[in-house]
Image (tube, rainbow, N blue to C red):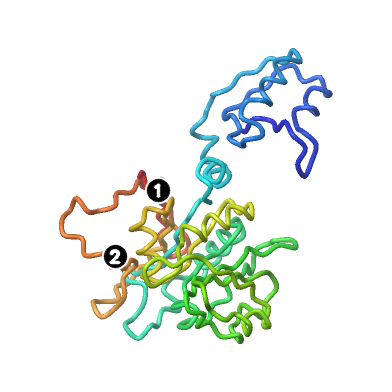
Amino acid sequence: TLEPCAFHGRTPPCVDALIEAGIGRVVVPIEDPHERVRGQGLQRLREAGVEVDSGLLTGQAEDLNPGFLKRMRTGRPWLRVKSAVSLDGRTGLANGESQWITGSAARQDVHRLRASSGAVMTGIGTVLADDPSLNVRDVETPGRQPLRVVIDSRLRMSPEARMLELSGETLVCCTPGQDGTRLEQAGAQVQEFGAHGDGVNVFEVLAALAEREINDVLVEAGPRLAGYLVEKELVDELVIYIAPHIMGSETRGMFDTPHWLTLADRKVVDVIDLRRVGDDMRITARFGY
């Protein structure tokens, strides 16, 4: 699906193995956008007498690896926002109660999403309201948990938060000048980022995650952070689980956004998948900024 690498990384160059094996023809949908490859693998194959066809089934191949390609091309990981809502699009009651909107099959499906992600991101509001674990359960993840990322500009997170007692790493992102000693003593990594308004500069956070070679970030957050990410056009994909019930008007929505005045302000998405998961429906949609 991707051009064979042409440099020593964690493993020797794949192109050397192909040449040594005597492969006669190689079909490659996508040239590797990595700055140390970018066509060099294909060139070396051709120079060695290997027949090379490239550019075939490119769209399908890109769908298999959106995170790596996004990170290489933009310096940011693929950002996927997950939300569980009622049939009328509500994520919780006015008092914050939200467990559980969807059924067990949908919740297990979310754990598969977590397992396929390099990081799971949430905001401090969700941490204070729900004390989530944000780890992978009931799905095989041998020796690996995704990095847990908390956007917490003023470090309101408790050192006794549940996720700090679990295996895996937790990164707490704050604005400059905060004292992270108590959280660090509890096992968290605390990192300062520039301020953006009254919060953390999420653009910087995503760039830092990319530097850690994280390709895919799953966002499980409340309407404020989710709405901010949509408004700033940072979200690549939505995964929305819809439960077959109505929660009414005194409830919370999926996204808190600026006061959009016309239909032209809408954010248009392309629904790429619709399927049933247990008693719920799952919609997967992508933005086309």
| Residue 99, position as x, y percentages in the image | 45, 79
**Residue extending furthest toward the top:** 49
Query: In terms of depth relative to the viewer, which is nearer, 74 or 270?
Result: 74
Q: How many marks?
A: 2
Q: Residue at x 52, y 57 (%)?
A: 206
Looking at the image, residue 37 lies above or below residue 223:
above
> Does residue 17 appear to the left or right of 99 in the view shown?
right
Q: Amino acid under label 1?
A: Arg
Q: Which residue is mark 2?
A: 257
Most foreground residue, 6 or 288: 6
Residue 196 coordinates in the image, percent (x, y): 40, 65
- Badge 1: residue crowd in 10 Å (few <14, some 14–19, many ≥20): some
Splitting the image into 4 quarters, where does residue 197 fall?
A: bottom left
| Residue bearing the label numbered 1 | 286
- Residue drawn at x 74%, y 61% is 142
Residue at left offset 62%, top offset 64%: 147
In this view, the residue farthest toward the left is 262
Q: Amino acid at mark 2?
A: Thr
